Image (spheres, rainbow, N blue to C red):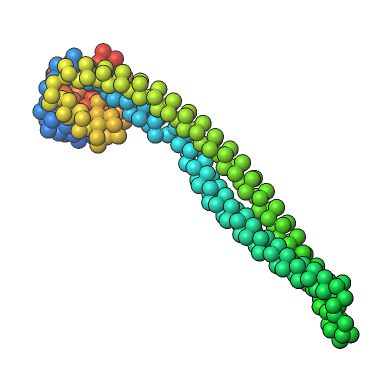
Amino acid sequence: MGRGDQGLPPGHRPVDRARPHVLHRLTRFTGALRLNAAPADQNRLLDLQAIDSKLDQLAHRRRSLPEHAEIEKVTADHTALKDLVVAAEAQKGDTARELTKAEQDVEQVRSRAARNQQRLDSGAITSPKDLENLQHEIGSLAKRQGDLEDVVLEIMERQESAKSRVEELSARLEHSTVVLTEAEGRRDAAFAEIDGEAEKVKRDRETVAAVIPADLLKVYTKLRETQGGVGAARLYQRRCEGCRTEFSITELNAIKAEPADKVVRCENCSRILVRTSDSGV
Ligand SMILES: [Zn+2]
């Protein structure tokens, strides 16, 4: 078939030049496959393809739910907030210990001053030198107490801001927990809906796949793996619906010449090309 082209007058060559090559490719594809299947089984392959594409879409929808990105972001915020709360709590604890220590210092100075004052008031000390020393010490202790009380106030201020920071961060952490739980809830609801639909589609698939001959199914499955999930395509209005290649009249004639139970494959994408009444052949 087709070798007669070589003998055409030179005037026909621009039109027919591609033909021997095209025929060679078509022969190669159908010849190498050596697979026959009843047209009805080939048509069932299109049903199976539609089901598998639906399952792929559902799996894609499951993977690309907007909630995934949202949950990832909220989880990161949540973890960062938890760390900040821990750090703020530690700071709050540090200031509490610092305050206790500073208050003890104040108390120590205060009681020492009180004891000195008592001694002064008791009139027991009569030596002018001792009295002067004692009064001098009382003065120093008052100054020291004032300084230590300033330190206490400064620590109290820091403690207050540490407390507010813990409260503010805890409120934000609580809010992020709510947001996270809510996003996870939406994701799980979407999962349940998608999985429920997938279960129904899988049952349909079992019914359809059960009646397709094993050798045809095997070629289809292998092609689906290598051809982006599409193993069988309809030949529709002279085009391969798998790769959108439009066939020339010459190519269509070659396909048409194949028996109806011959499994034809697209010369461009190698998918199983299923002929239907709309194929234009
Ligand atoms: Zn194709």
- Residue 51's place in the image compared with 8, above or below, is above
Q: Give the side of residue 235 with respect to residue 175, left or right.
A: left
Q: Is residue 14 above or below residue 241?
A: below
At x 52% / y 44%, what residue is drawn? Answer: 78
The answer to whether residue 68 is seen in the rendering is: yes
Residue at x 12%, y 26% (from the top left corner): 215
- Res 145 visible: no
- State left or right for residue 109 relative to residue 82: right
Along the line of sight, the residue nearer the viewer: 111 or 164: 111
Q: Position of residue 41 (x, y in %)?
A: 18, 17
Residue 27 sits in which quadrant?
A: top left
- Quadrant for the C terminus, please: top left
Side of 186 where 96 appears, left or right: right
Side of 133 relative to 72 (left or right):
right
Furthest residue toward left: 34
Q: Nearer the viewer, residue 76 or 162?
A: 162
Question: Which of the 4 quarters of the picture holds residue 64?
Answer: top left
- Nearest the viewer among 54 and 129 is 129
Give the answer, above or below, for where 221 lies relative to 277.
below
Name the residue rendered at 26%, 17% in the picture.
204
Residue 156: horizontal and vertical position, in percent?
A: 72, 57
In the foreground, 9 or 218: 218
Residue 30 in percent (x, y) is at 15, 29
Q: Measuring 73% from the left and 62% from the top, which residue is drawn there?
A: 152
Image position, residue 2 (x, y; %): 14, 28
The mark tally for this picture is 0
Check the picture and name the quadrant holding the N terminus. top left
